[in-house]
Image: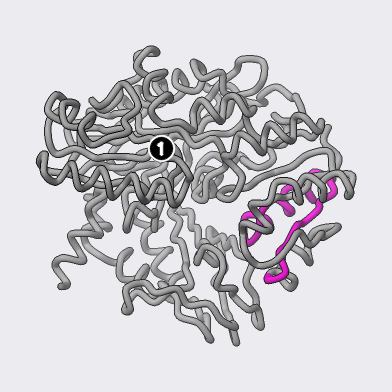
Amino acid sequence: MIKKVLIANRGEIAVRIIRACREMGIETVAVYSEADREALHTQLADEAVCIGPASSAESYLNMERIISATIISGADAVHPGFGFLSENSQFARLCEQCQITFIGPDADTIERLGNKSQARNTMIQAGVPVIPGSKEALYEPEEAVPVAAEVGYPVIVKAALGGGGKGMRVAADETELRHAFCTAQKEAVAAFGDGTMYLEHFVQRPRHIEFQILADKYGHVIHLGERDCSLQRNHQKLVEESPSPALSEALREQMGKAAVTAARVSGYENAGTIEFLLEPDGKFYFMEMNTRIQVEHPVTEWVTGIDLVKEQIRIASGEPLAYTQEEIHLSGHAIECRINAENPKKNFRPSPGKIHDIYLPGGKGVRIDSAIYSGYEVPPYYDSMIAKIIVHARNRQEAVAKMQSALGEIIIEGIDTNVDYQYELIGHPGFASGDTDIEFIDRLSEEES
């Protein structure tokens, strides 16, 4: 069993992992940049090690410093959380070489699935539905033109590596495609250091549905149902829920089987997420696999009663899965809203600064995942998410009402947040009816303008 875990991350996910480890009797080591010296995760962990200046490149993305902190502290495992080095195969390989348990899949699996073009071809061979698109990597606009003609416009150009909505552009015709390809490729090189691209037919007005899977080293793979992540702005998720209001039991079973197949053919081990696009007619397509814990994992924990972080640690310790597929049942409905330090009225401009006063809601069926507190200084160097509000109720209608109540109670003074924006979003008739897709927020913005 793992005895001591270094958390190679910050913010609410670091706090979340520390709490899970504490309940399991596992010691924890926090790492922090100079900007995070007073951060909550440094105070809750058993030990804390400074790994560099505020810049992510010199701290949370510096593999050598994190490995050194792991060795010096005597930790026998690293949990990467999400973001930063969580899907970096080189970091996972360094851990393996230093005989440090990486709480996640092995380096080869991350490498194989991290390349979206390669992952896509793997799914095609396994019979998992994929969106029509390029079978080979693309490097020049001229290579993309005949592929687009074959799969049909509109198309979307995507970076083969990376994520977070970067390196993606939609084109409606050949002229737009040439411009979109060059723009997306430049963005991909700047963000990920790689200009390898691929192209897909652009599915219009789909839902973003992802299935949570767990897989151990003995070949057992199960899914824990789906999350509907369709409410997005600039490809960034804002609200997630489970189960999806769009899935029937038959479709859930069909997509769940495809997710398990995708994980199995990939030789996957640990927790992961298979992401699909779902069309209004019920057709679905594999999009990508995330080889880490997701920001939105709490909604799955609410409806299944399974602690995903603890399961990650148990799997990494070599334990077999404690559940069979037949034992997984979804109970009630859960919704998560991401609270960001930003100003929606000023084009979502980030709002770092000192929190002077704070009140976060509670009560039956309300969960807060956060690392902020009164007097905390939100640094300007990292992602703007400062909290997640998650609610659980007997059904979707009650969950929506509970989320509105929770959002209405929040007080965060000293910085701007998107709380009011989320409140209006949850209260919109379109969301209340469950009739949403990944273009829903874009349409709302167009109506307001």
Residue at position x 60%, y 43% from top? 86
Q: Quadrant of the C terminus?
A: bottom left
Residue at position x 57%, y 23% from top? 268
Q: Quadrant of the N terminus?
A: top right
Q: Which residue is mark 1?
A: 210
Asked whether 327 or 372 is in front, the reply is 372
- Horizontal side of 133 relative to 20 (left or right) equals left
**In the figure, residue 311 lies in which quadrant?**
top right
Based on the picture, tell me whether residue 17 belongs to the magenta stretch. Answer: yes
Residue range of the region highlighted in magenta in the rendering: 9-35
Neighbours of disc 1 within 10 Å: few (<14), some (14-19), many (20+): many
Rendered location of residue 173, percent (x, y): 10, 41
Rendered location of residue 331, percent (x, y): 48, 41
Q: Residue 351, relative to residue 262: is it above or below?
A: below
Residue at position x 33%, y 42% from top? 208
Q: Residue 388, relative to residue 352: is it above or below?
A: above
**In the figure, residue 58 lies in which quadrant?**
bottom right
- Horizontal side of 341 relative to 285 (left or right) equals right
Q: Amino acid at mark 1?
A: Glu
